[in-house]
Image (tube, helix red, strand yellow):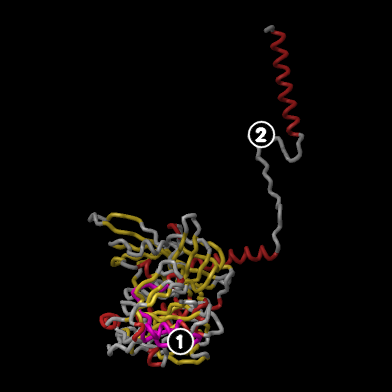
């Protein structure tokens, strides 16, 4: 290439660079700057939210500033693995080794400051199995204190611990009975080891029973507030607060799916504060009991009872010498309210009664024999209560033509006369034995199973005693199509329950 051609090429390239720079700088919104000058970024306000939105944003901010100092970080050292680890996913376990090469577990959780002098409420599963001097509380301002356990209640998973401090910022406790589904709430706690974390969501349901709290006797009080506010391991014992800055629940459990969707559950503060107050005063909570075995009422049960509402709880059995028996409660009673507060489920009844002590009274609104009545029940303690046993009498006379099993093909089950051994084993005087049942039949879907004894039925609120196969067969023949009834049955373990079933049964 000639020298002239090279010079021409250089000239053209230089001209192109200069032209490109001028062209770019001419576009609107761009500025030409060099490395030694400040780059200009956009800083205008593209949108102004409404006054309501701005007010809500400010409310979240102010409540967060108010409540975060009232929630503490709790670290707990235990020698053994927490037996609730898989059921209480808020606890965040780590492993460490001490100087003697002995293994310890360290779990973390949250707590709510109840009083200025250091009483703190948390979940029982957070501090359960803690070693001596194994509980450490860290405040919002990073001060650390050793804590001691004041008391704990297994049935509600509430515990109280104490630190030696003064002038703490105590939380304000609201009224969980006034909670409405859909209202905004905030969860405050220490998830995943990250202190003072606040998330927001709504109350997505109330009176939830998720089956995680049971004592050695199988009893537990679950009446959870359900929320979609994000909560994670470490939030356990933290505060669920409303937009007035009041604590309305104690975050206790989470449930999730494989797709990563999670819901949180909190103990209502009205229940938690009654328990906490007793723990502070006495170190334990002595709970009163009605002495009944209950189940939820659905549409079929309500129809069979002749009720005008499809809610409440059905009394399936009474504890011998229990408070309910002494007050005149009967098997088959439908409890629809406690102390003028409606009851729609068994866990609601347990929660309302579970705040009372032995010797205190509750007024029950009951549906019985086609009308509402009221019973005052003075609660008793749980110790010494046993299920009543039925003394064995001579077998009832049965109809001669029905001493063989009778099969009800449409419903899918077979009844047989009771043998003397079955009467003794089930501790009943009369009834019929479910000797066979067809899987996926109407009776199977209703919950009837082989090995049960049917000894009573309820039809439109009327009780019918089932003494024999003949009695049962006559009862079946008297039913109208699509009529709902309740069969009262007894298990080999001595439990009784009602099973709803719909005619035709033949």
Please report the bounds of the magenta region as a residue range: 447-476
Asked which secondary structure carries label 2, the reply is loop
248 in the magenta segment: no
Position above or below: 217 against 323: above
Number of other residues with Cα within 10 Å of mark 2, as a class: few under 14, some 14 to 19, many 20 or more: few
Q: Nearer the viewer, residue 192 or 164?
A: 192
Asked if 136 appears above or below 291 in the picture, the reply is above
**Residue beneath disc 2:** 34
Give the percent coordinates (x, y) of residue 50: 70, 62
Q: Which residue is mark 1?
A: 333
Displayed quadrant of residue 450: bottom left
In this view, the mark in front (1 or 2): 1
Whether residue 469 is in magenta: the answer is yes
Dot placed on the residue nearer the N-terminal end, 1 or 2: 2
Looking at the picture, tell me which residue is in the foreground, 407 or 31: 407
Residue at image point 37% right, 70% down:
124
What quarter of the picture does the N terminus occupy? top right
Give the image location of residue 292, x and y in percent. Answer: 39, 84
Q: Residue furthest front?
A: 401
Q: Is 77 situated above or below 319?
A: above
Q: Position of residue 454 (x, y in %)?
A: 38, 81
Which residue does the image show at 40% across and 91% down from the upper left? 378
Distance from disc 1 to disc 2, alpha carbons, whole Å, reads: 86 Å
The residue under the point 46% across, 74% down is 223
Q: Is residue 472 visible?
A: yes
The x, y position of residue 237, in whole percent, is: 43, 68
């Amino acid at each position: 290439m000639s020298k002239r051609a090279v010079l021409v090429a250089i000239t053209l390239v230089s001209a192109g660079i200069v032209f490109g720079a001028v062209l770019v700088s001419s576009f609107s919104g761009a500025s030409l700057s060099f490395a030694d000058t400040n780059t200009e970024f956009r800083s205008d306000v593209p949108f102004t939210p409404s006054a309501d939105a701005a007010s809500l944003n400010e409310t979240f901010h102010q409540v967060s500033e108010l409540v975060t100092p009232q929630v503490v970080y709790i670290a707990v050292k235990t020698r053994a693995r927490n037996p609730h680890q898989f059921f209480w996913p808020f606890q965040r376990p780590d492993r460490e080794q001490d100087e003697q090469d002995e293994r310890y577990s360290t779990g973390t959780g949250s707590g709510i400051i109840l009083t200025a002098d250091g009483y703190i409420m948390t979940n029982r599963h957070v501090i359960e199995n803690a070693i001596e001097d194994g509980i450490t509380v860290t405040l919002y301002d990073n001060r650390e204190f050793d804590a001691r356990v004041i008391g704990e209640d297994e049935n509600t998973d509430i515990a109280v611990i104490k630190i030696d401090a003064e002038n703490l910022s105590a939380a304000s406790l609201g009224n969980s009975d006034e909670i409405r589904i859909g209202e905004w709430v905030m969860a405050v706690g220490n998830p995943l080891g990250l202190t003072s974390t606040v998330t927001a969501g709504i109350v997505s349901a109330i009176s939830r029973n998720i089956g995680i709290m049971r004592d050695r006797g199988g009893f537990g009080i679950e009446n959870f507030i359900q929320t979609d506010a994000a909560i994670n391991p470490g939030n356990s014992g933290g505060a669920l607060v409303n937009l007035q800055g009041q604590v309305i629940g104690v975050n206790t459990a989470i449930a999730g799916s494989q797709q990563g969707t999670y819901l949180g559950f909190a103990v209502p503060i009205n229940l938690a504060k009654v328990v906490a107050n007793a723990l502070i005063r006495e170190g334990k909570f002595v709970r009163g009991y009605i002495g009944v075995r209950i189940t939820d009422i659905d549409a079929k049960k309500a129809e069979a009872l002749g009720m005008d509402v499809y809610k409440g709880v059905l009394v399936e059995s009474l504890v011998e010498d229990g408070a309910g028996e002494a007050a005149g409660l009967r098997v088959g009673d439908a409890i629809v309210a406690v102390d003028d507060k409606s009851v729609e489920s068994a866990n609601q009844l347990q929660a309302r009664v579970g705040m009372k002590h032995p010797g205190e009274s509750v007024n029950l609104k009951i549906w019985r024999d086609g009308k509402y009545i009221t019973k005052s029940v003075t609660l008793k303690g749980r110790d010494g209560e046993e299920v009543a046993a039925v003394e064995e009498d001579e077998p009832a006379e049965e109809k001669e033509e029905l001493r063989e099993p009778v099969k009800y093909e449409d419903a899918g089950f077979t009844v047989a006369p009771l043998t003397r051994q079955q009467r003794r084993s089930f501790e009943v005087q009369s009834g019929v034995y479910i000797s066979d049942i067809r899987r996926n039949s109407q009776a199977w879907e209703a919950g009837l199973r082989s090995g049960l004894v049917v000894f009573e039925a309820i039809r439109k609120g009327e009780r019918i005693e089932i003494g024999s196969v003949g009695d049962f067969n006559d009862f079946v023949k008297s039913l109208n199509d699509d009529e709902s009834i309740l069969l009262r049955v007894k298990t080999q373990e001595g439990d009784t329950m009602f099973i709803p079933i719909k005619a035709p049964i033949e």
